[in-house]
Image (cartoon, grey):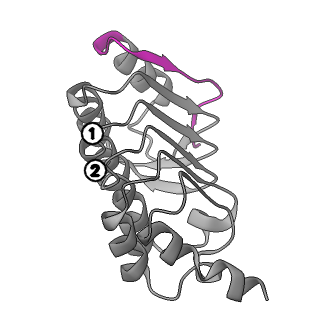
Amino acid sequence: DKKIITMGIVDQIKNNEITTLHLSEPPEDYFADTGAFVDAMAANTSIEKVIFDNEFLSCSIGNQRAEIVSSVGKLPNVKSVVLKDSLLMVGVCVTNLAKNAKSLEELDMENCLLQGLPKDFGLLKDAISANASMKKVRIHDCTAPNEKVNLNSEMDNLKAGLSIDVGGEGCSVKQ
């Protein structure tokens, strides 16, 4: 029954029937084809807030996750994005999202494994800096698996270089 009910989310997105998109279950509970989801996101003009948490991103595979997160950047009216409980490729997923979401005001990453090199975090900073609508970035309880990345110093770099509210705590480097 659940699959029958939730399979309609792609149609709801495509038909501009929702303003908040909150997905928590594994992707296959919502759609069989990532391409159909990405196409629906590209056609949407109603969604203003996106929350991906629990098993939604963590149960998706690398390329699928990158397509899903990047598709959020194609939403012309998205103002707030919350990404939780997942591995995120900073240089691909998050940077594309920040660069392409022209109305994005708030980006929140919580309990995520932020995968990337220092240059990827630099690209993210550039994308956030270039996004005129961005007001707040929050990175909370995240870990960077690359020993060359110190999230606390990356947070300091964001704070120093951007005239927006950058906050977060509990970030660490995976040992």
Residue 15: x and y, percent? 44, 70
| Numbered mark located on residue 33 in the image | none
Depth check, front residue: 136 or 16: 16
Q: Amino acid at mark 1?
A: Lys
Q: Comparing marks 2 and 1, which lies closer to the viewer?
A: 1
Circle 2 residues within 10 Å: few <14, some 14–19, many ≥20:
many
Residue 117: x and y, percent? 32, 44
Q: Which residue is mark 1?
A: 102
Q: Secondary structure at mark 2?
A: helix
Q: Quadrant of residue 67?
A: bottom left
Q: Quadrant of residue 171?
A: top right
Magenta residues, start to end: 160-175
Circle 1 residues within 10 Å: few <14, some 14–19, many ≥20:
many
Q: Is residue 122 above or below residue 52?
A: above
Residue 29: x and y, percent? 65, 81
Q: Amino acid at mark 2?
A: Asn
Whole-Å distance between the Cαs marked 2 and 1?
Answer: 11 Å
Q: Horizontally, is 24 left or right of 62 in the view?
A: right
Q: Is residue 60 visible?
A: no
Q: Is residue 112 above or below residue 104?
A: below
Residue 53: x and y, percent? 64, 55
The residue shown at (35%, 61%) is 71
Depth check, front residue: 37 or 165: 37
Q: Is residue 109 above or below residue 106?
A: below
**Label 2 or label 1, whichever comes before in sequence order:** 2
Q: Horizontally, is 20 left or right of 155 in the view?
A: right
Classify the position of the N terminus by image quarter. bottom right
Q: Which residue is mark 2?
A: 96
Depth check, front residue: 123 or 153: 123
The residue shown at (28%, 42%) is 120
